[in-house]
Amino acid sequence: MSTLIVTAHPDPDSLTHSAARRLRELIGTEGSALAHLAQEGFDPRFSPGDRRTYVTRGVPDPAVTAEQRRIDAADHLVLVFPVYWWSVPALLKGWIDRVFIAGWAFTYDDDDRVVPQLGRVTAHLLPISGTAAESFARHGYTQSFATQIERGVVDFCGMRRGVTAFVHDSESEDGARVARDVEAAVTAIASAITGSAPDVPANLRDQVQAVPGSAQEGVPARERGEQHHGGEGEQDEADHPEGEQA
């Protein structure tokens, strides 16, 4: 079993990176790899060359094929990221835009219907968000996140849904509570990958919930520390669309 853990955060000392490192500790360094997109300098911009590749079904940029090869070598793909504007950071969105393309992530049949190609991969999500779970859900962001990322990316490409484990209210001054929440999230994902029973405290189990028709569902929340980006609509005092800063 091989696992690729992908992060999208500019700060190597961030909670995102800490969670990714802890996850790798739990599943074991042998057979797993970390891909820190920001530190590796991945360019998320969809270029004219990417557009030509899309139109002509030509050969992708070498940087794109390198990412595809990393995913091809993995049985499990784990995305660990701060939540910005109720979704993934621009870096991770650009990675998805450029890498998960026709001819590799999906193809078309003779009737122009989409044929998913990534059924060999199980995808897990560890979003770290600054907003309390209850507020996130009340404003509809829980459902919109699931629709955009779980259904729109994971399901569209045929990947098996693994665990989605959100870290809630990550900017809380209660650092011990945030640390427990991170441990619960990484433990749930590690257990799904290794096949062991997760040891998640009862009071934290609401962070890893079942998704109808899939392995798991999480309730989006908030990660400790990233810069504020502002939200939309009615918000509670604790609502922040940003991810982590620390």
Image (cartoon, rainbow, N blue to C red):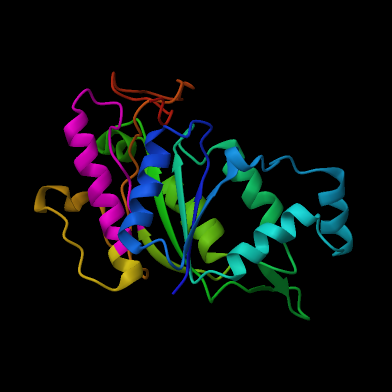
Measured along the vertical axis of the image, is residue 20 above or below residue 196?
above
User: From the viewer's perspective, is 177 left or right of 21?
Assistant: left
User: From which residue to which does the magenta span run?
Assistant: 164-190
Measured along the vertical axis of the image, is residue 13 above or below residue 127?
above
Rendered residue at 54%/75% (across/down): 119
Rendered residue at 42%/41% (across/down): 17
Screen quadrant of the C terminus: top left
User: From the viewer's perspective, is 96 left or right of 166?
Assistant: right
Looking at the rendering, which quadrant does residue 244 occupy?
top left
Rendered residue at 49%/31% (across/down): 11
In the image, residue 80 lies at what x, y percent? 44, 47
Q: Residue furthest bottom?
A: 110
In the image, residue 105 lies at what x, y percent? 65, 66
Looking at the rendering, which quadrant does residue 235 occupy?
top left
**Viewer-side residue, 141 vs 37:** 37
Measured along the vertical axis of the image, is residue 49 above or below residue 211?
above
Screen quadrant of the N terminus: bottom left
Q: Residue furthest front?
A: 30
In the image, residue 42 lies at what x, y percent? 67, 43
In the image, residue 7 lies at what x, y percent? 50, 45
Measured along the vertical axis of the image, is residue 1 above or below residue 9?
below
**Number of labelled discs?**
0
User: From the viewer's perspective, is 159 left or right of 200?
Assistant: right
